[in-house]
Amino acid sequence: MGRVIRWFKGDQMRGAGQWGWTIGMLGAGLVGAVLRLVDLGNRPMHPDEAVQALRFARLLEQGQYEYDPQEYHGPSLPYLSWAVVRAFGLRKLQELEAWHLRVVPAGIGILLVLGPWCLRRYLGRLACLVASWLTAISPALVFYSRYYIAEMLLVGFSWGGIVGWWGVRNWLGRFSSGPKQKLPFGLLVLLGSCLGLMYATKETWVIGLVSMLGGLWLTMPPVRAIPKAQGGWAFGVVVATGVAIWAMLFSSFGQNPAGLLDSLRTYLYYLPQAGGWGQDHVYPFWHYFQRLFAWKMPGGNWWTEMFVLLLALAGGLGAVGWRRFRLPARQRRLAQFLGAYTFIQAFIYSAIPYKTPWCALGFYHGMVVLAGLGWAAIWRTIDSGAHREASRFGNAFRWGPLGRITGGFATKAKPKLTEPVQQHLDVPLPGENKFCLPSGHTTGSQPFQKGKTHLGVWPTTKSGMNRRLLRGPWACLIKRGCLSALLLFGSGHLVWQAYRASFLAIADPTQPYLYAATTLEVAGLVATLEQIVQCHPDAEAVPIQVFFPDHQYWPLPWYLRRFRRVGWFGSFQEAVGSAPAPIILAHPDMEGDLREYCYSRQPPGQRRLYITELPQGPAQWEIRPHVWIRLYLRWDLWEAWREKISLVPPELGIGHFCNLFISPPLLPIFLTCFDSKSYGSTPFVSAIFNSNNSKELVLNRFDRMSKMAKIRVLDVPEVPANLCVPKNSFFCG
């Protein structure tokens, strides 16, 4: 029990020791790795992930990469992915799986969990451990560590820049003690490398840079004049390292020198986008905070990371030196820097109208580390030996509501008269033999008097057992035990949300971390296509055409990567001169243009019937929320697939009628009979019926299906009456 008490009283985990702290850090890293690496490919590829994957495929297969100043962000993600994927022994896009690519941001996320260790001397062991633990289990940081986008890389490189800068800052501060200081070459290289990688990751790196400079301006201590030689060398190392990385990546290692100029021109395109001019994704100022700390959509659950926010606010109070949350000078300076960095970045991101939820990671990670310092500040405040000045405000927490619940720290003075007062109260105060009373007055060097009540605004219980429990060490134990239970509860809530977001609600549009995400129906579309192509002689080489307005068909290029002949079109004007493919995927709103493309533009003898109702399964799929795509199959391929998946065995004999409906109103239709040998079915009889001032074509034919089937055929426009119909073809034209 004594060891437990010493641990709870230990301001910086002195009782736990070096091994306990090391095990705690390794445990945080292990939990973070499990949440980030297990079942990494479970979630459908987001359209942004698919775009990045297809651009990376060119680098993987052809060894070529060109920076695009208008889209797709910087080159650091594809080049890091190249190193990882090549380590797996992969060389082709068709060989890739989603988890191969997501290993890159997941690895950065794991390193970010261990990142506070780099500043352990300035954070303190307790704050370092709590910051690592919160980083490991934060639902937002876990979810986007499993996302193949550049955001997690930007956060990781930003933290590396903070680590490098804080080391350089302390080196500059040491000039006050002497003009001769050894150049911290490693820290300078780290700072320059991380700044260069931030630039090469995403255009929003300038927001992180401005936030760092703001924190620097607010927290830079006064230093003596730095020798010009050392100052010049330090500045030169940082700039040279950053420029070298920038030049190598943006020029594609010398293959594309124009990329250097493009890296500067890119802000001409992104500034209007950030302003929300003519763009979607425009949200109010508080949108990021709503998503992170108070999110609920109709039909969904509550999502919140309020526990992190409250601890970060406590860290901010410790940064400004509020007496209830006093931090040591070394921790307070770092808390001030992180507070300024987080506040400036959060304000800039919130002020920009264009918002996507992953952009919040930049300031949210700073908030998580600041929360670790907030926990350390609260832990010290709860301690009966917390460092506080002799003032009534400094004792307000001790004698406030929490003190009232526990009855105060001590009410009866039992120690010897000659012992210093601070030993009884465990309250180290400035000066010798001085202690603080609830009223804020000091008694100088007066000793305790036996049997006299010195402390306690509220009366104490008469029970001897209660008096022993409410003395300083035991009160500290009780309060810190309650605080530890609160940490476990808050951590458990965060772990549950992280698990639910990354493993259960992977395609739930009501969760705050998904945004314009791919639905689970895409997997059904791919499975259907894989069944259909097996009925074609060319198998996976069968021609497929995809028509979608403005080329917004993502993430389909990723999911159809194993089909070797896929054409991607943003309009039917782009398909002029090409014949319709046996398989066509198109947005439902483009069906009118599709009829014209398949029939009116094709010469006689090359017009084929396309079916939109499939023998099995749906005919259209929701690839993104409220974004649909429809499948059109050429009749011969449809017939071959139907015969393959027929549920009634052939020995059952003749089946029932199959009614084939064409609607809405049709104009003259020219049909020819099937060749029964080619299609394995008896000829059919056609008739045109008039009803409700419309024309409807019903095709009656015998087949082996067990029940009536309604098959919708692509509507066709009017055609000349003298159209020649070739034999052995079935079409509307």
Image: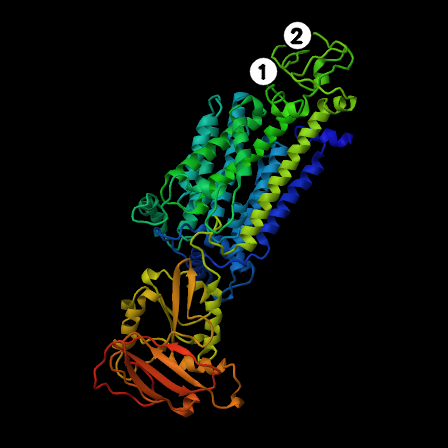
Tell me the crowding category of disc 2: few under 14, some 14 to 19, or many 20 or more residues within 10 angstroms, Cα based.
few
In the rendered image, the vertical position of residue 723 relative to residue 88, given as above or below:
below
In the rendered image, the vertical position of residue 91 relative to residue 416, given as above or below:
below
Quadrant holding the C terminus: bottom left
Q: Residue at the location (47% across, 81% down)?
A: 707
* x, y percent for residue 674: 37, 89
Chain-order first, disc 2 or disc 1: 1
Nearer to me, 322 or 301: 301
Q: Residue at the location (63% across, 29% down)?
A: 379
User: Label 2, on which residue?
Assistant: 444
Nearer to me, 33 or 663: 663
* x, y percent for residue 473: 72, 24
In which image quadrant can residue 327 be found?
top right
User: Label 1, on which residue?
Assistant: 392
Question: How does the figure colour the protein chain or chains?
Answer: rainbow
Nearer to me, 246 or 697: 697
Q: Residue at the location (66% across, 8% down)?
A: 443
Hey, which residue is sitting farthest front in the picture? 692
Would you say 280 lies left or right of 459 here? left
* x, y percent for residue 728: 34, 89
Give the SS element for disc 1.
loop
Q: Amino acid at mark 2?
A: Gly
